[in-house]
Every structure is written in C-alpha cells, then in structure tokens.
C-alpha cells in the first residue's frame, strides 16, 4: 500500500508550536495577537488570516506585504518542532513494514524544508517527498500513483485539511483519513471520508 502524509498538523505540530510563534512576531501587542490568532483559527491558512486581519484593522498593502514575507522567514536557530501524537511511533512502525510512504506538503519550499529538518521528520526514509508551492496536491497524487503502480484503493492519504489534503485524493478514488489536529479539529467529518484519527498509531489498524 502507498501511504501519503501531509506535513503540517499531520506529522508535525504546526498549530501548537510554529503558528503562535510566528503570529505573535507580526503584531505589537497581546490584544492584536489574540485577534489575529482567533482569525487564523477560523481560516484555511495563515495567509488568509493576515488578509482578514489587515482588512479589519484598516492596514495597508505595505503592511500585508511585509507580514506575508515575514510569515515564511527562517525559524529561530535552536527551535525544535514537536511531532503530533503517535507520529514518531507510526513512522517507526512503517519503517519496518513493506508499505511505500510519501510526503506531499504545500507551501513555501524553503520553509517546508526547514520544518522537516527542525522536526527531524526528514530522518524517516520517505520514498518520495514533494512540495506543492501552489498547494494543489492533486497532480502530485496522480504522479505518485503512476510512479509506484498502485491502484486507487491501494493508496491512503492522511491530512488535516479536507479541501487541500483529502478532497483531491477522494476525487481520484483514494482512501482518505482526516487527521484530528490543528485545523482538522475544527471541521466536520464528511460522509465521503473513510475515517478519522486522533492518534496516528490508529492507522496501523488500516495498514496491518
């Protein structure tokens, strides 16, 4: 079986570690931070949250442009990014299995690679790692299916954002599991989803 993981809030705790640090650096006071944080909680991405915050506060294009740039600045030198619940244990289990494991993440390439390094997720021997800069993952899913010669139901995708991570996979006939972490805590499970996982180790029941 081919298992495809998202990175942010699927394997690494972006919402609990990176997002608060980055948002707090963009605004001058606690009240502004709380407002931006709650906007971000309701948005599909931090970039969209910045746009809404700028509109609410009447901030100009220059502020938005600078904040958007700083959103993807390198993280502090000694910063360590924790993994989500069960991620390390599942990756260890998969390393001893016959499954093919791939990572498809979306966003700024250099920033995503930095997250991989600081979380040490890159120590896992993925068969493929791809970064969708435009966050359109469907072409990458199709490419992986062809590359590894898997039929649709032999492919499982796990991610926290239905629209970006799961719906494109579902449209290709893949099995899809909602990761209950980060933005995945705020969405409803849809009938077309094959399941949901709170602890990533739960996936071993689907892969055994």
Image (cartoon, rainbow, N blue to C red):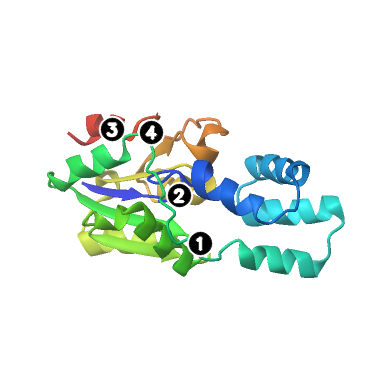
In three-dimensional space, the C-alpha distance between marks 3 and 2, rounded to whole angstroms, equals 17 Å
Q: Nearer the viewer, mark 1 or mark 4?
A: 1
Mark found first going from the N terminus, 1 or 3: 1
Q: SS for tag 3?
A: helix
Sequence-earlier tag: 3 or 2: 2
The disc at residue 8 is 2
Question: Could you tell me if the residues under marks 1 and 4 are in contact, i.e. CB atoms within 8 Å?
Answer: no
Q: Quadrant of residue 94?
A: top left
The span from disc 2 to disc 4 (Cα, nearest Å) is: 20 Å
Assess disc 3: are there few (<14), some (14-19) or many (≥20) residues with their C-alpha within 10 Å of its C-alpha. some
Q: Which residue is mark 4?
A: 194
Which label's residue is closer to the chain start, 1 or 4?
A: 1
Q: Is residue 179 left or right of residue 64?
A: left
Q: Residue at x 29, y 55 (%)?
A: 102
Sequence-first tag of 4 and 3: 4
Q: Nearer the viewer, mark 2 or mark 4?
A: 2
How far across and down, in percent of the image, does residue 181 sit? 47, 36
Q: CA distance from mark 4 to mark 3?
A: 16 Å
Near mark 2 (Cα within 10 A), the count class, few <14, some 14-19 or many ≥20, is many
Give the mark, 2 or 4, whose residue is nearer the N terminus: 2
Proximity of marks 3 and 2: CB atoms separated by less than 8 Å: no
Q: Is residue 189 above or below residue 118?
A: above
Give the foreground label among 4 and 3.
Answer: 3
Is residue 72 positioned above or below 97 on the image?
A: below
Mark 4 is surrounded, within 10 Å at the Cα level, by few (under 14), some (14 to 19) or many (20 or more) other residues, namely some
Given contact means CB atoms under 8 Å apart, are the residues at marks 2 and 1 in contact?
yes
User: Which is nearer the eye, 76 or 95?
Assistant: 76
Q: Tag on residue 107?
A: 1
Marking on residue 201: 3
């Amino acid at each position: 079986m081919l298992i495809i993981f998202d990175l942010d809030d699927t394997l690494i705790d972006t919402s609990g570690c990176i997002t608060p640090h980055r948002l707090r650096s963009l605004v001058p006071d606690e009240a502004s931070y709380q407002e931006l944080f709650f906007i971000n909680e309701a948005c599909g991405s931090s970039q969209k949250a910045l746009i809404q915050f700028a509109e609410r506060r009447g901030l100009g294009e220059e502020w938005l442009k600078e904040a958007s740039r700083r959103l993807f600045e390198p993280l502090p030198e000694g910063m360590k990014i924790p993994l989500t619940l069960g991620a390390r244990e599942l990756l260890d289990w998969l390393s001893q299995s016959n499954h093919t494991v791939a990572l498809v993440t979306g966003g700024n390439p250099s920033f995503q690679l930095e997250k991989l390094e600081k979380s040490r997720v890159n120590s896992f021997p993925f068969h493929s790692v791809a970064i969708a800069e435009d966050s359109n993952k469907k072409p990458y899913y199709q490419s992986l299916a062809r590359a590894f010669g898997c039929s649709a139901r032999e492919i499982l995708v796990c991610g926290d954002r239905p629209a970006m991570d799961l719906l494109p996979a579902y449209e290709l006939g893949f099995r899809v599991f909602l990761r209950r972490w980060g933005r995945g805590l705020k969405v409803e499970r849809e009938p077309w989803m094959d399941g949901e996982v709170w602890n990533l180790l739960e996936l071993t029941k689907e892969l055994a």
